[in-house]
């Protein structure tokens, strides 16, 4: 089982879109996937059609010692969801308790759950205790980066944050970058891609997810791209991205 945190402190980079659609794409490839909604806003649940998700979710795991399997929900074949829960925002109130509170999610996973190929954690756009829990629990971080200089600045800030947790972790943290919401025709996008390739050789997933109105429409319908527009370019991109993810294919 691989624990993957989809993470970026910058908002608007497509973390929830990637979590929902990549998760579904992996399940369609025969992988067993659990998606964890670690954002108190609960947008991942809505993206999968749970507009009124259960009131309890990962909050119960982190705050009250529940098991992951007691709060997960089946959404599609081979695709489970652990909703945020109404009390998830309360985790941030315990920041004064230090490192101990940054291990709540890791300890929750260690209490046991059904065997999965991938657990993907959709993280909030912040640098708080929830993100710290994701970093401490994950085997790998998947970092969506947009094709602009603000995206590069956000990546630099995130890498600095990750370094702060390196000494607290007892195992290495794999890092991969995903180019997201890219407008390939822009000269700026091409410049950003080249800078990323120079700074992160062998760490950028081969497939790029391009900006598309259809991806913005999916959550309102509670469907993934494979249900909303299965023949779209975006659906093909996410299918290829899942193959990259499974096979470890990176941009050359």
Image: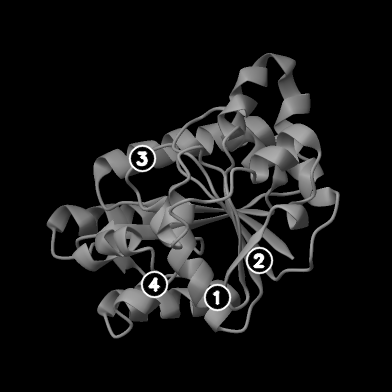
Q: Tell me which corner region of the image, top left, top right, bottom left or bottom right, holds residue 224.
A: bottom left
User: Quick check: can you spot residue 198?
Assistant: no
Q: Which residue is mark 4?
A: 207
Query: Which mark, residue 11?
Result: 3
Of the numbered discs 1 and 3, the one sitting upstream in the chain is 3
Q: Residue at x 59, y 76 (%)?
A: 246
2 and 1 marks in contact (CB < 8 Å): yes
Q: Is residue 144 above or below residue 25?
A: above
| Mark 1: secondary structure | helix
Q: Which mark is residue 26?
A: 1
Mark 3 and mark 2 lie on one chain; the one further toward the N terminus is 3
CB contact under 8 Å: marks 2 and 4: no
Contact between labelled residues 4 and 1, with CB atoms less than 8 Å apart: no
Is 85 left, or right, of 51 in this rendering? right
Q: Position of residue 206 (x, y in %)?
A: 42, 72
Is residue 23 something that shows in the picture? yes
Q: Is residue 213 above or below residue 246?
A: above
Q: Which residue is mark 2?
A: 118
């Amino acid at each position: 089982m691989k624990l993957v945190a989809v993470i970026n402190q910058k908002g608007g980079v497509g973390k929830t879109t990637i979590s929902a659609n990549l998760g579904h794409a992996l399940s369609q490839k025969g992988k067993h996937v659990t998606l964890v909604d670690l954002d108190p806003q609960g947008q991942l649940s809505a993206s999968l059609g749970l507009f009124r998700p259960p009131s309890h979710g990962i909050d119960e795991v982190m705050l009250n010692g529940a098991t992951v399997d007691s709060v997960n929900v089946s959404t599609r074949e081979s695709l489970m969801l652990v909703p945020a829960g109404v009390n998830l925002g309360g985790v941030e109130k315990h920041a004064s308790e230090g490192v101990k509170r940054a291990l709540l999610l890791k300890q929750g996973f260690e209490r046991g759950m059904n065997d999965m190929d991938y657990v993907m954690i959709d993280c909030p756009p912040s640098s708080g205790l929830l993100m710290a829990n994701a970093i401490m629990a994950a085997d790998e971080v998947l970092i969506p980066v947009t094709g602009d200089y603000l995206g590069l600045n956000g990546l630099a800030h995130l890498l600095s944050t990750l370094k702060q947790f390196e000494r607290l972790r007892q195992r290495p943290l794999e890092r991969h970058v995903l180019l997201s919401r890219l407008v390939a025709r822009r000269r700026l996008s091409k410049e950003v891609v080249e800078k990323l390739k120079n700074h992160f050789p062998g760490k950028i997933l081969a497939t790029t997810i391009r900006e598309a109105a259809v991806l913005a429409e999916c959550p309102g319908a509670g469907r993934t791209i494979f249900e909303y527009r299965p023949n779209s370019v975006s659906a093909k991109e996410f299918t290829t991205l899942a193959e990259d993810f499974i096979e470890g294919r990176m941009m050359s």
